[in-house]
Image: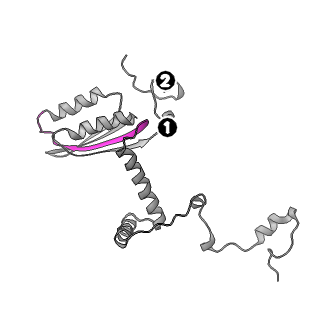
Amino acid sequence: MTNARTIPVPDKLQWAADWLAPAPQPNNIIPLSEQFMRRVTIMLDDALMDEIDRFIVERGYQNRSEAVRDLARAGVRQAMEDSGMDGACVAALVYVYEPDVRDLPKRLTDLFHDHHDLSVSAMHVHLDRGACLEVNVLRGDGRDLRCLGDSIIAERGVRHGRLVMVPAESDDICDADCRDRHDHAHARKAD
């Protein structure tokens, strides 16, 4: 019996020949998510490769490529943050502070009131008698978000803090004029 691929087939019937052809073996199938990627070869020392392999196991990655892509994205994002990302951004400011430090809750509140145009939402959690966790969602220009984040984290009594910024298309950042584009309300800036 001859293979469907070796029989000459008129163009009109090529679809049938393709359908009858043997299916590719699983190791020949390239996932759709990888069809538009480039293969890159890198050299890593054994110690770094061991760290990456531990990371892969701890996080449950299916393969090294997925883990390295995520690590590369995180590194690029961190480098952008460190270099002073500007333009339209959204951010999460997460910090732990001591509420009993003199006037700290008032100073933090004042800082957010002074930058109300950057603040979208806040969550406050009492961790124990001497520690509170705050999570603040911010949006605006990256320089302004970095300035606010640095001011909060530098306050005496703030133990740990981190600002995670993500670039956003300016169309993704809703301003006072965007109320007409969708049907939910936004707080307006005071005139």
Q: Quadrant of the N terminus?
A: bottom right
**Callout 2, which amino acid?**
Asp
The residue lying at 82 percent from left, 81 percent from top is: 2
Nearest the camera: 159 or 45?
45
Q: Quadrant of residue 3?
A: bottom right
N-term-proximal mark, 1 vs 2: 1
Find residue 177 and name its label: 2
Q: Quadrant of residue 137?
A: top left
Tell me: residue 102, above or below residue 64.
Answer: above
Q: Residue 113 at what x, y percent from top left?
A: 27, 27
Q: Residues within 10 Å of mark 1 (few under 14, many from 20)?
A: few
**Callout 1, which amino acid?**
Glu
Tell me: residue 111, above or below residue 45.
Answer: above
Nearest the camera: 28 or 21?
28
The residue lying at 44 percent from left, 35 percent from top is: 88
Q: Quadrant of the C terminus?
A: top left
The residue lying at 39 percent from left, 40 percent from top is: 85
Q: In this image, 151 relative to 9: left or right?
A: left
Q: Residue 158 at what x, y percent from top left?
A: 19, 42
| Residue position for label 1 | 169
Q: Looking at this rendering, what residue extends furthest in the right direction?
A: 10
SS of the residue under disc 1:
loop
How many marks the image carries: the answer is: 2
In magenta, the rendered stretch is 86-102
The residue lying at 49 percent from left, 26 percent from top is: 178
Q: Residue 115 at what x, y percent from top left?
A: 31, 28
Q: Residue 76 at what x, y percent from top left?
A: 42, 51
* 96 drawn magenta: yes
Tell me: residue 47, above or below residue 73.
Answer: below
